[in-house]
Amino acid sequence: MITQDIYELAVQVGANLSERKLKLVTIESCTGGLLAGAITDVAGSSAYFERGFVTYSNEAKMELVAVDPAILQQYGAVSAEVATAMVVGGLQNSRAQVGMAITGIAGPEGGTLLKPVGTVYFAWKVLDGPVVVAHKVFFGTREEVRWQAVEFALHSLILTTPFLSFS
C-alpha cells in the first residue's frame, strides 16, 4: 500500500516534471508497476506520465523495450547492464524525455550469494543526458523490498537528476 511519504515524493516528481514540461516513462520488473501506480495516484499525472512498461519476464524485456538477449544471457536480468538497456529501450519506445527502470530480486526466493534477495538495480535518463545507474540491497519482506525500491526511485528522480532538481 502506498504510504504518505511515497505519495508526497510522487507529487514532487510530478511537480518537477510539469514545471519543465517533461514526460516520464517507467520500466519496471521486480516492482511490477508499483512506481507507475505511485505516480498515477497523483491527480493530474496524465500531464507528465507518458506510459509504464511492466517487463517482469525476460521475454517482456526483449519484446517491449528491446533488451538484447545477449545482455540478459551475459549479465542476468538483475544487473546494471539490463537496467541500462531497459531505460534506453523504454525511452525509445515512448514519447517520454525521462525514464526510470527498476530490476531486482524482491524475494523471498531467487537470491544468490552474489545477488541476494533485496538486490535492485536502477537506471534513469533525462533528455540527452547520460544513463545513471544505482545498485541497492534492501532488507525486509517482499512487499517492503518492492516499496523501498519505489521510494528510492522517486528520491533519485528528485535528488540526483540535475535536470529535475530545484537546487
Image: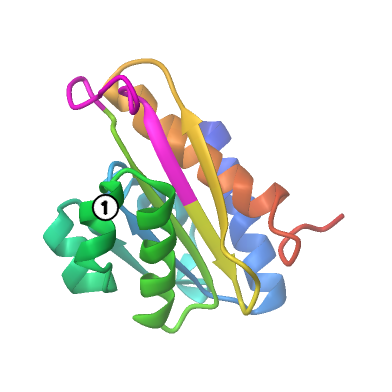
Residue type at mark 1?
Answer: Gln
Residue plotted at (61% across, 47% down): 156
Q: Which residue is mark 1?
A: 74
Q: Position of residue 39 (x, y in %)?
A: 46, 55
Q: Is residue 1 visible?
A: no
Viewer-closest of 102 and 19 = 102
Residue plotted at (26% across, 46% down): 76
Q: Is residue 55 visible?
A: yes
Query: Which residue appears farthest toward the top when viewing the image?
Result: 140
- Does residue 130 lie above or below 96 as drawn? above
Query: Which residue appears farthest toward the right when viewing the image?
Result: 167
Which residues are the magenta region? 107-122
Residue plotted at (37% across, 46% down): 79
- Does residue 21 lie above or below 104 as drawn? below
Q: Main secondary structure of the magenta part?
A: loop
Q: Position of residue 5 (x, y in %)?
A: 57, 33
Viewer-closest of 73 and 13 = 73
Viewer-closest of 19 and 61 = 61
Image quadrant of residue 86? bottom left
- Does residue 142 lie above or below 165 as drawn? above
Residue plotted at (65% across, 72% down): 129
Residue 43 horizontal side relative to residue 82, left or right? right
In which quadrant of the rendered image does the C terminus lie?
A: bottom right
Q: Position of residue 2 (x, y in %)?
A: 41, 35
Colour setting: rainbow
Image quadrant of residue 20? bottom right
- 118 falls in the magenta region: yes
In which quadrant of the rendered image does the N terminus lie?
A: top left
- 92 falls in the magenta region: no
Residue 153 horizontal side relative to residue 80, left or right? right
Q: How many marks?
A: 1
Residue 90 horizontal side relative to residue 167, left or right? left
